[in-house]
Image: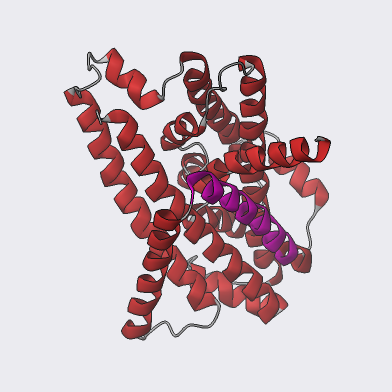
Amino acid sequence: MRLSAVLEEGFELLRWSVLAASTIGPGTVIVCSKAGADYALTLLWALVLASFVAYALQEGAARLSLLGRTTLGRAMRTMWGGGADATPGGCWAVAAGVLLGNTAYQANNFVGAAEALYALGAPRSDPGVRFLMHLACGLAVLGTLFFADVDRVSAGLGVVSVLMIVTFAFALSQLGLDGGELVLGLLPSKPPRGSGIVAVSMVATTAIPFNAFLASCAAKPPDAGGSLGAAVSGMRRGVTLATAIALVLSVLIVATGAGVARHVDDDGAFSVESLVDALRAAEGGFAVACFGLGLYAAAFSSALTVALGAALCCASLLAH
């Protein structure tokens, strides 16, 4: 019975890690890599600040679902005067915005997946290969969502998030890390000149408002006879773990970009291709493979959560 309880708790924590998978996409990898390559570790404090904001958004939305026994979308529908079979215009507008924004986000995920495969050796200039890569990624996403249980997909994404930490940690181990510089970077400081857009981008890719809907839909009120207090405590542990995974992974990516910049003198414009070339020159093909696998995992996991989250969000916003 004790082992069963431990496994159940572990599965529940992994299920909440879907929030980390939603946060860490190719946009996060590229923005954090650029921050490290251009400004070393001086902007890490922006990730810490954004993580507190992300936790507050996600914990508040999930607590609403548990204590109010409703989702954030249904609460908005009630607030705007919608009943069980009616959907106010405001909810239609929010749903349309979610679909539009997530479509753009999904396109970014597919581009990120392609960049990861280019890093792993796929030919960049062949349009046929590019088509097959996007087709395979799309079919894999559809197959996973249509034929897998939502909770199992969420738990699987939690495992992927942990594997991304291992992958980027290994890449960083090949480059080295200055502990003193890391500590100073985590402390609030004045951003370097010209880094404002990058700092704001780091915050925007970490504290994602859409994740509030995802957290709300992920929260499950206890069964009859279950303890509401225990459910809230479990939810907070899950959200805390997801936020911590996203923060640690983002810090590792920034440090990887900074490590590449230390080892290679490259004054050109930042791009994934230039970063991969610099990483290959600094540490060889194995480090590039780790970076490519980490980027692909981020793109694929984010592609799953964007589609899953949009469906759950719109289902809660619209009367059905």
Identify whether 11 is placed above or below 69. Answer: below
The image shows residue 37 at horizontal and vertical percentages of: 60, 60
Q: Is residue 160 left or right of residue 149?
A: right
Q: Position of residue 38 (x, y in %)?
A: 57, 57
The answer to which image quadrant residue 239 occupies is top right
Determine the image quadrant of residue 44. Answer: top right
52 w.r.t. 122: above or below: above
Q: Main secondary structure of the magenta part?
A: helix
Residue 303 left/right relative to 91: right
Query: Where in the figure is residue 110, as x and y percent of width and height?
Result: 39, 64
* Residue 104 x, y percent position in the rendering: 31, 52
Closer-to-camera residue (159/264): 159
**290 inside magenta stretch:** no
Q: Residue at x 52, y 20 (%)?
A: 66
The magenta segment is: 149-171
The correct choice, above or below, for 96 with respect to 251 in the image is above
Q: How many marks?
A: 0
Q: Can residue 194 be seen in this snapshot?
A: no
The quadrant of the image that shows the C terminus is top left
Task: Give me the residue at 59% from left, 47% from top.
Answer: 155
Residue 276 visible in the shown view = yes
The scheme the figure's colours follow is secondary structure
Q: Residue at x 59, y 35 (%)?
A: 51
Q: Is residue 97 above or below residue 121?
A: above
Observer-nearest residue: 35 or 10? 10
Where on the picture, by quarter, is residue 176?
bottom right
- Identify the residue shown where x is 49% and y is 49%: 149
Front residue of 297/147: it is 147
The N terminus, quarter of image: top right
